[in-house]
Image: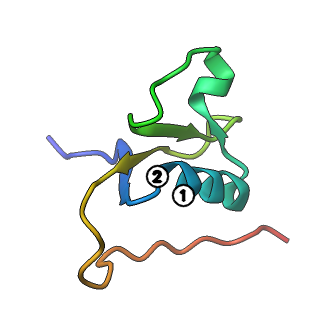
Amino acid sequence: MTARFKDLALDAGDHQALADWWCRALGYLRRDSMTGDSRPADWPVPIVDPVGDGPLIWINPVPEAKTVKNRLHLDVFTPR
C-alpha cells in the first residue's frame, strides 16, 4: 500500500505568531475559530484551508531555540 500525505507539522518558538503568519499568507483559518473550540495557549495550533482544498497544518510550540537551517522548503504561489 502506498503512503499518502496527511498533515504538515511545523515547530516554532512562537507558535501563535507563526500560525497567524501562515493564516495570512495562505488564507487559512485557525481551526478553533471555525469550530468554536478553545485550546490552551501552549497547545499546538491547527490551521486549515477554509474551502478544504489544502492540507491541515499544525504549528507546534517547542522550547528550544532554532540551531540549524530548516531542511524543509515550501513552495507557494498565488494564482493569476
Q: Quadrant of residue 21?
A: bottom right
Residue at the extreme right: 80
The figure's colour scheme reads rainbow
Q: Are marks 1 and 2 in contact (CB under 8 Å)?
A: yes
Residue 70's spot in the image, x, y percent?
32, 78
Residue 48's spot in the image, x, y percent?
58, 38
Residue at (75, 69) in percent of width and height: 78
Horizontally, residue 68 falls left or right of residue 33, namely: left
Residue 64's spot in the image, x, y percent?
24, 63
Q: Quadrant of residue 34?
A: top right
Q: Amino acid at mark 1?
A: Leu
Q: Mark 2 sits on what residue? A: 15
- Residue situated in front as seen by the camera: 53 or 74: 74
Residue 47's spot in the image, x, y percent?
55, 40
Q: Is residue 62 above or below residue 72?
A: above
Please give the label number shown on residue 60.
Answer: none
Horizontally, residue 23 falls left or right of residue 68, namely: right
In three-dimensional space, the C-alpha distance between marks 1 and 2, rounded to whole angstroms, equals 5 Å
- Residue situated in front as seen by the camera: 29 or 6: 29
Residue at (33, 48) in percent of width and height: 5
Q: Amino acid at mark 2?
A: His
Residue at (62, 16) in percent of width and height: 35
Q: Dot 1 surroundings within 10 Å: few (below 14), some, or many (20 or more)?
A: some
Q: Quadrant of the C terminus?
A: bottom right
Q: Quadrant of the N terminus?
A: top left
Horizontally, residue 26 falls left or right of residue 56, namely: right
Horizontally, residue 37 falls left or right of residue 65, namely: right
Q: Mark 1 sits on what residue? A: 18
Residue at (40, 37) in percent of width and height: 42
